[in-house]
């Protein structure tokens, strides 16, 4: 069975770890201050923001560990290394985001039924601190969030927390001037619903990768047709396509030939297959089993 892949260049300096550490310390600071402020002011939205910040701390720690593990080399008993560590981190973080949101919804409904007086000035100043600190963390992680699912999960946590802090500050201002204390749990409810909305897509995407589903951008039938046009290929079957991590998409398949070709001829055909699937579908790891006159199922996809 022939196997090859297109290599990737990783010569750029990796600043992900440093940015994650800075963000961790910023969120620890925000969490401590907002818990104290929430207890003193009686604000549920401020406490919910603090809880979200604490979930950010856990999220960032998980992301940092995953980022570190993903760089470890493969070994004989870990032939893929820890390349899936960041995908697992994204799954854990997205799940945590949704769980925190459900807890906030429960607390918000209870508080809506029993509104309480709140020290609005404290809410305003501490939410402003959350906006500044989370805003800085968002800027630090934004670049890597575009190309890395793990960093995106951390980025989304911080972005939603910054937006939550904005909502809390607006609520504090309204409570200060209009004494409308029902705004506090209502804001908490809105924050929680937004968390679920943001976390769902990430949870779905990370689950697809962990379950070895074919990426949404790839149509198996199109790939089979593309490869089948190369002479002297007769049939393409037993096709499996999956995403290992952010950088690697794998294809394995059995290819039935019209004639008993030489190994050197197969190598030439393999190069053609690699170029076609890489440039047209972004697949950078190809594993092909050549066959001639073999009696087996010729279905495109089979359950192994």
Image (cartoon, rainbow, N blue to C red):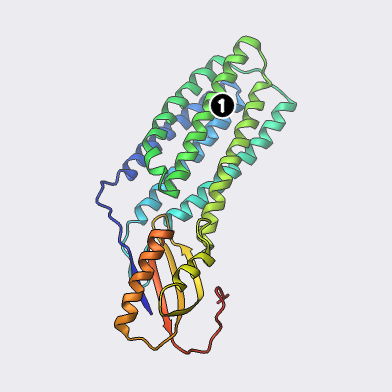
Residue plotted at (52% across, 18% down): 124
10 Å neighbourhood of mark 1: few (<14), some, or many (≥20)? many
Q: Position of residue 123 (x, y in %)?
A: 54, 20
Residue plotted at (62% across, 15% down): 175
Quarter residue 132 falls in? top left
Q: Position of residue 220 (x, y in %)?
A: 52, 66
Number of numbered discs on residues: 1
Q: Quadrant of the N terminus?
A: bottom left
Query: Viewed as shown, does residue 111 lie left or right of 295?
Result: right
**Res 268 visible:** yes
Quarter residue 106 falls in? top right
Residue plotted at (54% across, 29% down): 164
Q: Position of residue 210 (x, y in %)?
A: 51, 60
Q: Position of residue 84 (x, y in %)?
A: 43, 59
Residue plotted at (47% across, 90% down): 293
Q: Quadrant of the C terminus?
A: bottom right
Quarter residue 169 falls in? top right
SS at circle 1:
helix
Q: Which residue is mark 1?
A: 46
* 170 versus 208 height, above or below: above
**Res 35 visible:** no
Can you name the residue that lies furthest to the top here?
A: 177
* 88 versus 190 height, above or below: below
Query: Viewed as shown, does residue 11 lie left or right of 266?
Result: left
Q: Nearer the viewer, residue 300 or 72?
A: 300
């Amino acid at each position: 069975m022939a196997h090859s892949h297109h290599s990737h260049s990783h010569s750029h300096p990796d600043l992900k770890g440093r940015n994650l550490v800075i963000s961790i310390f910023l969120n620890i600071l925000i969490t401590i201050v907002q818990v104290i402020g929430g207890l003193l002011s009686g604000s549920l939205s401020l406490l919910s923001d603090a809880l979200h910040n604490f979930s950010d701390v856990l999220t960032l720690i998980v992301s940092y560990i995953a980022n570190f593990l993903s760089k470890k080399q493969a070994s004989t008993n870990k032939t893929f290394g820890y390349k899936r560590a960041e995908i697992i981190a994204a799954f854990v973080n997205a799940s945590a985001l949704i769980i925190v949101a459900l807890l906030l919804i429960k607390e918000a409904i209870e508080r809506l039924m029993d509104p309480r007086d709140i020290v609005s000035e404290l809410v305003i100043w501490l939410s402003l601190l959350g906006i500044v600190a989370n805003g800085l963390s968002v800027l630090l992680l934004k670049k890597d969030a575009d190309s890395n699912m793990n960093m995106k999960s951390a980025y989304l946590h911080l972005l939603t927390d910054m937006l939550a802090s904005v909502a809390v500050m607006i609520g504090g201002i309204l409570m200060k001037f209009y004494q409308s204390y029902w705004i506090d749990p209502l804001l908490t409810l809105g924050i929680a619903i937004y968390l679920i909305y943001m976390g769902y897509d990430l949870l779905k995407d990370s689950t697809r990768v962990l379950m070895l589903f074919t990426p949404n951008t790839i149509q198996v039938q199109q790939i089979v047709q593309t490869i089948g046009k190369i002479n002297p290929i007769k049939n393409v079957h037993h096709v499996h396509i999956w995403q290992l991590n952010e950088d690697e998409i794998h294809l394995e398949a059995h290819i039935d030939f019209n004639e008993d070709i030489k190994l050197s001829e197969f190598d030439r055909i393999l190069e053609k297959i690699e170029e076609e699937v890489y440039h047209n579908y972004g697949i950078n790891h190809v594993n092909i089993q050549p066959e001639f006159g073999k009696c087996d199922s010729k279905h495109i996809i089979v359950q192994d």
